[in-house]
Image (cartoon, grey):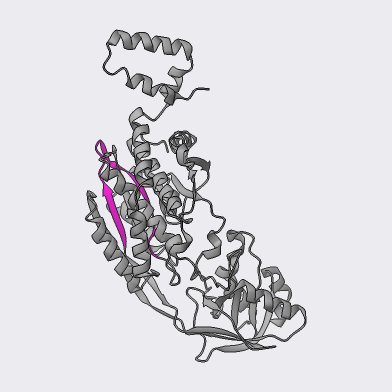
Amino acid sequence: MWHQSFLFPLFDALTNQSYLMKRILTLVLFSILPFSSEIIAQSALTAEHRQHAQDLITKAMGSDLAWERLTYMADTFGPRFSGSQNLEDAIDWIVETMEKDGFDKVWTQPVMVPHWVRGEESATLLSPREKDLPMLSLGGSVATPEGGISAEVIVVKSFEELEQVKDQVEGKIVLYNVEFTSYGRTVQYRVNGAIEAARHGAVASIIRSVGPYSMKTPHTGTMYYDEEVPKIPHAAITIEDAMLIQRLSDRGEKIEINLNIQAETLPDFESRNVIAQIKGTEYPEEIIVLGGHIDSWDVGQGVMDDGGGCVAAWEAVRIMNELGIKPKRTIRVVLWTNEENGLRGAEEYHRWVKEEEKSLGNHVLAMESDAGVFDPIGFGFSGSDEAYKILSEIGETLSSIESGEVSKGGGGADIGPLMRDGVPGMGLSVDGSKYFWYHHTDADTMDKLDKEDFNECVATMAVFAYAVADIEERLPQ
């Protein structure tokens, strides 16, 4: 079947012809393509939309600016953990730079965030032989006493196995040697492992890092306590060392580890969301929001998770402005703070648009990039079937870079509060085959990214945001 885009160049060529000639050619076209009038009526995109989409793709793919900005941010400020000066310095630089980019408005939104500081830490295998164990304590962990905790280790592969040996846990360190299957299934041992081990009298808990691959890289991440259960230190060791300890255990060796964590939880700290927007020309009260989270863990450079997503969203809107593309609706970039260990930025933005700006009902679409800026596939979308059809049509304009596939089901942590209140949401889908190799590790660094892939992410976000902001009818909810 011929696509409706086949007709647009023909109609464009008629702009300087007489009405009669236009009418004659229209009748001829419709006689040879009897389905075309129906397709045109159903299309949400005009020839101008398609041209602007191609302009955005070309601009994104031909520019090094965003890549250079991401590199500068990563190398200059490093990891940007909530409560850190690194994060606040990065935010200052972003705001200063955005103000030079020609946005209609740039501002910050105060957010009180948790402030956990890692401190000195180590893990040492004491017996059956001495060995240093690369480790990262998990975000929010309590400290050990000075000098650490030395105790025998009991190894389990699941919460069910822990329950089976619960009578042997008292006074020991529990090691969860859980093989990575999927993030959702495996991360529960990071999140809840300390609670379950403490229920049975463990003095500390350790997990095999949550990831499918390792080169001696431990993974950090958030964890929780239950106020009804004693709080014990909780840390992650490498996949290699977890497997070593499992083999020692299987041979019946007595295993002892010293775990030393000098972490500290300080009073909440004032951070900021960063917000920039270009105002819509016809429906300025209607808002398309896109972004990522500007905070990261306190290791690596936080470029994959999620500095790249932030800079890509920022650049997507900046190039619209540079090209002089003025959409009908307002497009707003939000760089949320504190996604990693609190979601305070997302919750504050949601509260503000609901209670102060009173624009929640006018949020047309929320878009997020928080799965890395690797080779983009398209977006996962949660919303109405009618909106899905429109977004799928928009996705077709990205065929040149093969990043326009729209699948059902998607969103993100920072747009989650908006989505819970009915705002349609979509999350950027990328080739994530190596994402969890580097996730929450010292290896989340600039060299893991590819400039062309990153620029394709910029183009993909730009095209979807622009088209939704400029189609005549608001995206159905």
Above or below — where is 322 with respect to 91? above
Report if residue 135 lies within the magenta region: no
Toward which corner of the image does residue 28 lie, by quadrant?
top left
| Image quadrant assignment for residue 174 | bottom right
Residue beneath the point at 22% across and 55% down: 100
Residue 79 location, quadrant:
bottom left
Say how many tags the image has: 0
Q: Nearer the viewer, residue 126 or 143?
A: 126
Q: Is residue 293 magenta?
A: yes
Inspect this view and state whether residue 75 appears. Answer: yes
Work out which residue is located at the far right of the displayed protein and give it.
251
Residue 240: x %, y % from top left: 64, 73
Q: Which residues are magenta?
A: 273-295
Q: Residue at x 34, y 58 (%)?
A: 68
Q: Position of residue 158 (x, y in %)?
A: 68, 69
Q: Looking at the picture, does residue 221 appear above or below residue 62?
A: below
Q: Is residue 331 left or right of residue 133?
A: left
Front position in the image: 385 or 370: 370
Q: Position of residue 254 (x, y in %)?
A: 72, 86
Q: Is residue 340 above or below residue 320?
A: below
Q: Main secondary structure of the magenta part?
A: strand
